[in-house]
Image (cartoon, rainbow, N blue to C red):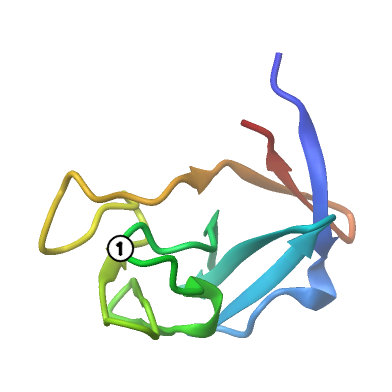
Amino acid sequence: MPQWLRLCSTADLPAEGEVRELAMGERLYCAAMVEGRLTVTDNECPHRGGPLGQGLIEQGRVICPWHAWAFDLRTGCALHNAKACIHIYPTRIEGEDVLIESR
């Protein structure tokens, strides 16, 4: 059975078309809001560890601020290499709490 952990409050979520770093304990996550859909991923780019939550959103993709690797927010895969992916966490909102499924 999955374990759901509180990531943040709904007030902490990024605005539409934006990305934000969110901390749970000592770990950082990347949260993006695109077309009213929240996506939470690992914050670390698999290329060189760039902070995805400090990047940009373009056409439904999060763009790493260090080397511009682009990841599709529906699949988690890089545009130029389908084998380079970031984990997308299942999310749900309960009241004012944003929960993610632990891995």
Q: Residue at x 39, y 85 (%)?
A: 65
Most distant residue in the left direction: 80
Q: From this viewpoint, which residue is outermost toward the front?
A: 48
Dividing the picture into quadrants, the one containing residue 96 is bottom right
Where does the image place residue 47, in percent across and percent down from the top left?
A: 30, 63
Count of numbered circles on the image = 1
Residue 18 at x, y percent in the picture: 52, 84
Q: Is residue 49 above or below residue 25?
A: below
- Mark 1 lies on a secondary structure that is loop
Above or below residue 91? Residue 55 is below
Left of 64 or right of it: where is 4?
right
Q: Residue at x 70, y 22 (%)?
A: 2
Q: Mark 1 points at which residue?
A: 47
Q: In this view, does 56 lie above or below 90?
A: below
> For this rendering, which residue is in front, 83 or 99?
83
Q: Position of residue 34 (x, y in %)?
A: 46, 73
Q: Does the image show residue 86?
A: yes
Name the side, left or right, on which 40 lies relative to 75. right
| Residue 36 visible in the displayed image | no
Q: Which of 65 and 32 is in front in this view?
A: 65
Q: In which quarter of the image is the N terminus?
A: top right
Q: In which quarter of the image is the C terminus?
A: top right
User: For residue 38, what is the image quadrant?
Assistant: bottom right
Label 1 crowd bin: few (<14), some (14–19), many (20+), radius 10 Å: few
Type of residue at label 1? His
Horizontal relation, residue 2 to residue 78: left or right: right
Give the residue at x 62% y 85%.
Answer: 15
Instruction: Give the image location of residue 13, x and y in percent.
Output: 71, 74
Say which residue appears at 58% left-offset and 41% top-offset.
90
